[in-house]
Image (cartoon, grey):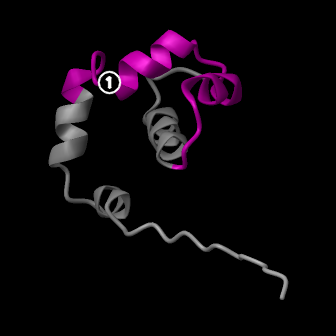
Amino acid sequence: MSLANNEVKLLVIALDEQGYSASEIASQTGLGKSTITDFLRKESWQQWWNEYEGDESQIQSERHLPKVLLLDIETSP
């Protein structure tokens, strides 16, 4: 995989938003850890980030949906 592919970029962003570490994302995508961290810090692919963050498409709106956390707490009497 390569960050030249937009689908890979979106996958990296999605995995990051799901709470995966840079190491876990790197192992799943085959990219280097520093490549992942540079991309997520927006230190690389600045033009792509500008277009992505300025885009009001469905992908952009999905990034800002609320996240729901369900806790199943069991207690004993």
| Residue at figure coordinates x 54%, y 49% from the top left | 18
| Residue at figure coordinates x 22%, y 23% from the top left | 46
- Residue 57 falls in which quadrant of the image? bottom left
Residue 59's x, y, as percent? 36, 57
Q: Is residue 46 left or right of residue 70?
A: left
Magenta-highlighted residues = 18-47
> Which of these two is toward me, 29 or 57?
29
Asked if residue 19 lies in the magenta stretch, the reply is yes
Q: Which residue is mark 1?
A: 41
Q: Eyeballing the image, is 68 above or below 49? A: below
Q: Main secondary structure of the magenta part?
A: helix
> Which of these two is toward me, 6 or 65?
65
The quarter in which the N terminus is drawn is top right
| Residue at figure coordinates x 57%, y 31% from the top left | 21
Q: Secondary structure at mark 1?
A: loop
Amino acid type indicated by mark 1: Arg
Q: Is residue 55 left or right of residue 73?
A: left
- Residue 27 falls in which quadrant of the image? top right
Q: Give neighbour class at mark 1: few <14, some 14-19, many 20+ (Cα, 10 Å).
A: few
Q: Is residue 52 left or right of residue 38?
A: left
